[in-house]
Image (tube, helix red, strand yellow):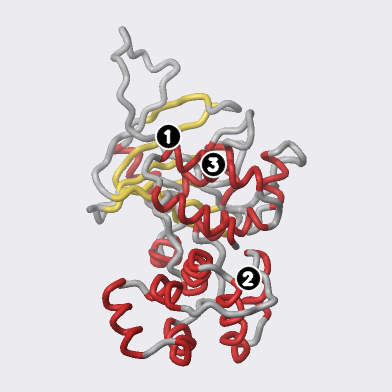
C-alpha cells in the first residue's frame, strides 16, 4: 500500500502528461503482478470494489477523536479521507499495511458486519499517506485526473513495439488485474483474445498539417469535424458499448442509446443522400466511411469492414 500511496501522491502533484506517464511506467515496471494490475484498475476506475459508506468511516472516528475537533477539522480540510488520515491515532499493531491485492480480496469476501473491524485494522497499520489512499479507494473517491488514454500510454511505454492504440484495441475486453495484457506488453505471451467483444476504435482527432501541393485522395483518410460531444457506438456479437473519444466506457450514462437506438434501418437511406464516401486502406483491406445525418441532432459515421462483423458508429451529441 505504501508504494501505491506514493504513486498516487506523485501523480496528483505532477502536472505534465509526459511526466505522469513516466512515473506510472516506472511503477508498472517495478511492481509485480497482480499488484500493478489492481493499481492500474484503481487509477482507471475499473476496480469495481464494494463502496464503503462515509458514515462507517465517521463511526470509526467517534471513539478515537473528540467530536468537536473532528467536525472543525473536517470543516477546515474539506475532505473526509484526508481528515481521518491525519486525525487517526497511532496504534501499536503487529499487522503490516495491506497490499492492494489483499484489499481487493478482503473487500470482496469479507461479510459486511466484519468490515468496520477490518478497516480499522488497516488504518492502524498505515501511515497518514497510506490511510488517505486507502480511504479514497474504499469510498470510491480515488482520482488523479489522468485521462484513461494517458494510463494506456504508460502501459504501452513498457514495450518497444506497441503503441497506445494497440492497448486501446484490447483494453475494454479485459478485466483487472490485466495479467494477459502485461504478458503481451512484456513479450511473455500472445495478444489478449478479445474476439467478439465490442472494443473501442481510436477516432481521428484534428491535427494541423502543412497543406500539400495536391489533394487527390490517395493516401489520405478524412473525417468531418462536428461540434458537440463525440461518442462511439459499437456493436459486436449482440453486445453494445458506448465510448468517449478518449476511449472511456460511457455505456451506463446513455442506456437509451444501448437499448433503444437502432441505426441500421435508417442509416443506409439517409447516408445515400447526404454522404461523402471516402475509401482507404486500413492495413488489411479496403474499408469505407459513410458520413451523414440521422436526425435529432445526432451525426453519424458508419464504418463496416468485410473482415469483421463489428459495427462502429461515431456519434456527435449536440452540445
Q: Position of residue 59 (x, y in %)?
A: 46, 90
Viewport quadrant of the N terminus: bottom right
Q: CA distance from mark 3 to mark 1?
A: 31 Å
Task: Name the front one of labels 3 and 2.
Answer: 2
Residue 43 lies left or right of residue 31; in this view the side is: left
* Disc assigned to residue 289: 1
Task: Name the front one of labels 1 and 2.
Answer: 2
At a point 46% along the width and 48% down the height, the residue shown is: 247
At a point 38% along the width and 76% down the height, the residue shown is: 80
Q: CA distance from mark 3 to mark 2?
A: 24 Å
Residue 112 lies left or right of residue 290; in this view the side is: right
Crowd rating for badge 3 (residues with CA inside 10 Å; few <14, some 14–19, many 20+):
many
* Disc assigned to residue 134: none
At a point 58% along the width and 38% down the height, the residue shown is: 156
Is 257 rendered above or below residue 24? below
Task: Name the front one of labels 3 and 1.
Answer: 3
Q: Residue tagged by mark 3?
A: 154
Write down the quadrant of residue 290 in the picture.
top left
Q: Residue tagged by mark 2?
A: 103
Amino acid at each position: 500500500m505504501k508504494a501505491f500511496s506514493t504513486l498516487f501522491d506523485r501523480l496528483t502533484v505532477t502536472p505534465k502528461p509526459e511526466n505522469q506517464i513516466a512515473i506510472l511506467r516506472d511503477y508498472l515496471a517495478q511492481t509485480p503482478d497482480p499488484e500493478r494490475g489492481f493499481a492500474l484498475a484503481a487509477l482507471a476506475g475499473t476496480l469495481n470494489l464494494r463502496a464503503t459508506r462515509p458514515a462507517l468511516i465517521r463511526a470509526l472516528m467517534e471513539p478515537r477523536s473528540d467530536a468537536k475537533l473532528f467536525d472543525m477539522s473536517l470543516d477546515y480540510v474539506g475532505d473526509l479521507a484526508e481528515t481521518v488520515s491525519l486525525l487517526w491515532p497511532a496504534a501499536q499493531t503487529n499487522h503490516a499495511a495491506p497490499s492492494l491485492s489483499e484489499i481487493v480480496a478482503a473487500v470482496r469476501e469479507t461479510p459486511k458486519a466484519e468490515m468496520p473491524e477490518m478497516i480499522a485494522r488497516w488504518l492502524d497499520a498505515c501511515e497518514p499517506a497510506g490511510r488517505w489512499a486507502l480511504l479514497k479507494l474504499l469510498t470510491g473517491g480515488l482520482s488523479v485526473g489522468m485521462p484513461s488514454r494517458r494510463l494506456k500510454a504508460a502501459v504501452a511505454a513498457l514495450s518497444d513495439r506497441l503503441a497506445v492504440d494497440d492497448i486501446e484495441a484490447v483494453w475494454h475486453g479485459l478485466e483487472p488485474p490485466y495479467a494477459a495484457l502485461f504478458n503481451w506488453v512484456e513479450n511473455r505471451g500472445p495478444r489478449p483474445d478479445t474476439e467478439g467483444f465490442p472494443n473501442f476504435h481510436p477516432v481521428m482527432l484534428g491535427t494541423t498539417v502543412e497543406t500539400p501541393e495536391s489533394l487527390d485522395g490517395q493516401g489520405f483518410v478524412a473525417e468531418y469535424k462536428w461540434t458537440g460531444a463525440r461518442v462511439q457506438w459499437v456493436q459486436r456479437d449482440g453486445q453494445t458499448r458506448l465510448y468517449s473519444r478518449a476511449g472511456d466506457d460511457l455505456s451506463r450514462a446513455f442506456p437509451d442509446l444501448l437499448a433503444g437506438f437502432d441505426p441500421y434501418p435508417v442509416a443506409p437511406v439517409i447516408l445515400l443522400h447526404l454522404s461523402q464516401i471516402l475509401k482507404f486502406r486500413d492495413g488489411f483491406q479496403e474499408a469505407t466511411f459513410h458520413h451523414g445525418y440521422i436526425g435529432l441532432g445526432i451525426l453519424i459515421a458508419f464504418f463496416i469492414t468485410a473482415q469483421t462483423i463489428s459495427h462502429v458508429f461515431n456519434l456527435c451529441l449536440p452540445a
